[in-house]
Image (cartoon, rainbow, N blue to C red):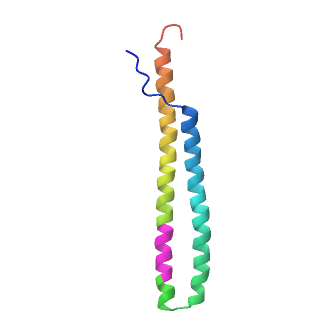
Amino acid sequence: MYNDALNVDLAELRESAGKLKNTAADLNTTHGAVHSKIADLVTEFGDSAGAAALRGRLAEWEAETQAHHNEVINHHGLYLWAEKRYLETDQGNASGIEGV
């Protein structure tokens, strides 16, 4: 018996994947600009303990930004993979129907 409970809009899935990719790029651009400003600011602290602490924290923030970027890009790839799999499944099912 046919069940239409699973209905995926491939265009919407592709659009969402694009939004994820743009979000990842925006994250890198925005955070990168802030990180750059902080790095410039650190030089004003000279060789102080505060400068060392801020450099250490900046390195942590940069690593966190990269991890978040990678996670969002991974989701982007999964959306594209899902779109491809749904399309392949639909095409495979269609080829099994007589006259298609």
Q: How many marks?
A: 0
The percent coordinates of residue 35 (x first, y second) are 57, 72
The percent coordinates of residue 20 (x first, y second) are 55, 49
Residue under the image location 46 percent in, 79 percent down: 56
Q: Which quadrant would residue 15 be assigned to in this image?
A: top right
Q: What main secondary structure does the magenta stretch of the protein show? A: helix
Extent of the magenta region = 54-63
Q: Is residue 56 on the magenta stretch? A: yes
Residue 16 vertical position relative to residue 2 in the rendered view, above or below: below
Residue 97 vertical position relative to residue 63 in the rendered view, above or below: above
Q: Which quadrant would residue 16 be assigned to in this image?
A: top right
Residue 56 vertical position relative to residue 11 in the rendered view, above or below: below
The percent coordinates of residue 81 (x first, y second) are 49, 38
Residue under the image location 58 percent in, 34 percent down: 11
Q: Is residue 85 left or right of residue 38?
A: left
The percent coordinates of residue 59 (x first, y second) are 49, 74
Looking at the rendered image, the quarter that the C terminus falls into is top right
Q: Is residue 16 on the magenta stretch? A: no
Looking at the rendered image, the quarter that the N terminus falls into is top left
Residue sitting farthest toward the front: 5
Residue under the image location 52 percent in, 46 percent down: 76
Residue sitting farthest toward the top: 99
